[in-house]
Amino acid sequence: MNNEEKKDKKDKKEKKRAKRAPLPKLDAERLLGEDGLRKLRMKSHELFINKREDPEKNLRNLMTFYQIWAHELFPSMKFRDAIVKTEKICREKRLNVYFQTLRAEKKNDQNDQNDKDSDLNLF
């Protein structure tokens, strides 16, 4: 009877264990989402790089900025692994199209700014 009681206790312990929720995967959807590249772009104004300071300090600030972003995006992955995975995902066509639109927007913004500056110089 002792063996049967032990088996019953093991069965109860096994039943009590809850299944873990699946970990989110780092994929193109996640990079294009709110916490992905958009968040990185929006928070980039918080990054301050001073030309007069030590370049090592500036690099440290930049790496810390990226580490925080990567940890918020995928907390269970190490920074190096997150960067490697992000680089692989960024080779996909969807993300290349996204980067092309960002570049086009930036170019249009610069052209608009140049037009405004040239208009001011005429007067």
Image: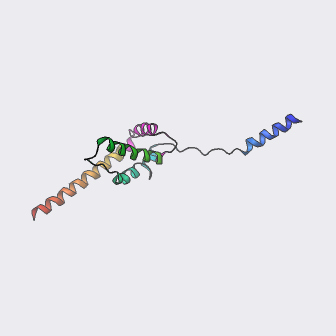
77 left or right of 51 in image: right
Residue at 21% from the left image edge and 54% from the top image edge:
111
Magenta highlight on residue 84: yes
Residue under the image location 36 percent in, 47 percent down:
98
In the orientation shown, which residue stands out farthest toward the top? 3
Nearest the viewer among 49 and 81 is 49
Question: Observer-nearest residue: 13 or 122?
Answer: 13
Determine the residue positioned at 39% across, 50% down.
Answer: 40
Q: Locate the N terminus by quadrant.
A: top right
- On screen, residue 27 versus residue 61, left or right, reads right
Q: Residue 6, percent across and down?
A: 82, 37
Q: Is residue 96 found inside the magenta-colored segment of the image?
A: no
Which SS type dominates the magenta stretch? Answer: helix
Q: Tell me the quadrant of the picture where the C terminus can be found.
A: bottom left
As drawn, the residue found furthest toward the bottom would be: 123
> In the rendering, at what x and y percent does residue 90 appear?
39, 40
Q: Nearer the viewer, residue 90 or 5?
A: 5
The image quadrant that residue 3 belongs to is top right
Left or right of 93 in this view: 24: right
**Residue 108, image x and y in percent?**
25, 54
The colour mode here is rainbow
Kindly indicate the quadrant of the structure image that contains residue 62: top left
Provide the residue span drawn in magenta.
73-95
Q: For the view shown, which residue lies furthest in the left direction? A: 122
Rendering coords of residue 48 (x, y %): 32, 51
Residue sitting at 34 percent across and 54 percent down? 45
